Amino acid sequence: MLKIKGLVKKYGKFTAVDYLDLHVPKGEIYGFVGPNGAGKTTTMKIISGLMEADRGEVYVNDIDVLKNQRKAKEVIGYMPDFFGVYDDLKVTEYLDYYASIYKINAKERKKICDDLLELVDLQDKKDAYVDSLSRGMKQRLCLARSLVHNPELLVLDEPASGMDPRARVEMKEILRVLKDLGKTIIISSHILPELSELCTSIGIIERGKIVISGTVDEIMQQVYRKRFIKVKIKDKTEECAKVMQEHPLITNIIKGENSIEAGFEGSEEEMAMLLKELVMRDIPVISFGQMEGNLEDVFMKVTKGDEA
Ligand SMILES: Nc1ncnc2c1ncn2[C@@H]1O[C@H](COP(=O)(O)OP(=O)(O)OP(=O)(O)O)[C@@H](O)[C@H]1O
């Protein structure tokens, strides 16, 4: 459904998207996770035909988005990560305005607006002024707006940001309904655990590159293959870090005052060998063990890759 290959976007000399590859099959809810500034919004705007790329390929079905942004916009619904100010516009007027941009006739527009307001549970607010809505309601209205032309692919930039827990649950329910209606959805967030419940697959983006991607299960497997260990030492932190840095199975070392955390890509036997080596090198080890790994931990560790 969505295929991205070698996508690059620079702002001046700064590379925001760095040879990014991504594949989202039809009917998936794909979670696009990354810290602030990782390149999520830039990528999503390019997918949605709202921004030019410097190089690469983006295909939605068989539409070449980079060459035919107009055609792409017909099959893509984009929900931005901010909601503008709409003085004096009522909820139905707002939706009707967006539907009119797609040249839908007045009779059809009314039906579409009614259906969408029902979908996002805002029927009771149809005559309310947009600016009077709560944040959660505004986000739902914004989602409805991205659906006026019945797109096949929905690109949602942080749709649940700033919402309270109840509003988040409501948003998730709506996204599940949309999935059941056959939509393909790509959704960005900083909040990994939320996405892991909702999404069928996940990609973690850091500095414009996808660092891990796959189904939630696949990512969990990667977590368990790549363990995180924690060594507590009485002193000699520097010496301990040096031994660990030289170890071929160790990655991503994070030094504390009297502790070291690190990624370890080996078996339990190899872990035992590492402990033995530390002790033989006279490092005063107080404790040595594997840290619990959940998706959020992986995300934190993977996106801290430059601290080794
Ligand atoms: N118009 C611009 N000019 C220069 N730099 C930009 C511009 N837009 C974005 N950037 C930079 O590009 C990088 C990626 O930004 P982007 O908004 O795509 O990230 P993001 O992952 O969506 O972050 P956030 O979660 O904060 O929205 C950031 O370092 C940002 O400062």
Image (cartoon, helix red, strand yellow):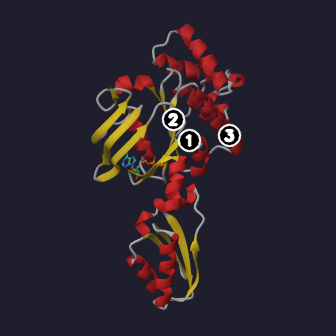
Q: In percent of the image, x 43 and y 64: which residue is there?
A: 305
Residue type pointed to by label 3: Val
Which residue occupies the foreground of this view, 107 or 4? 4
Q: In this view, does 134 lie above or below 62?
A: below
Rendered image: mark on residue 28: 2
Are the residues tagged 1 and 3 within 8 Å (C-beta)? Answer: no
In the shown orientation, is residue 3 left or right of residue 133? Answer: left
Q: Name the residue under label 3.
A: 169
Residue type pointed to by label 1: Cys
State the image quarter where residue 288 is shown. Answer: bottom right
Q: Mark 1 points at which residue?
A: 199
In the shown orientation, is residue 116 left or right of residue 215? Answer: right
Residue type pointed to by label 2: Glu
Q: What element carries label 1?
A: loop
State the image quarter where residue 115 is shown. Answer: top right
- Residue at mark 1 to residue at mark 3: CA–CA distance: 14 Å
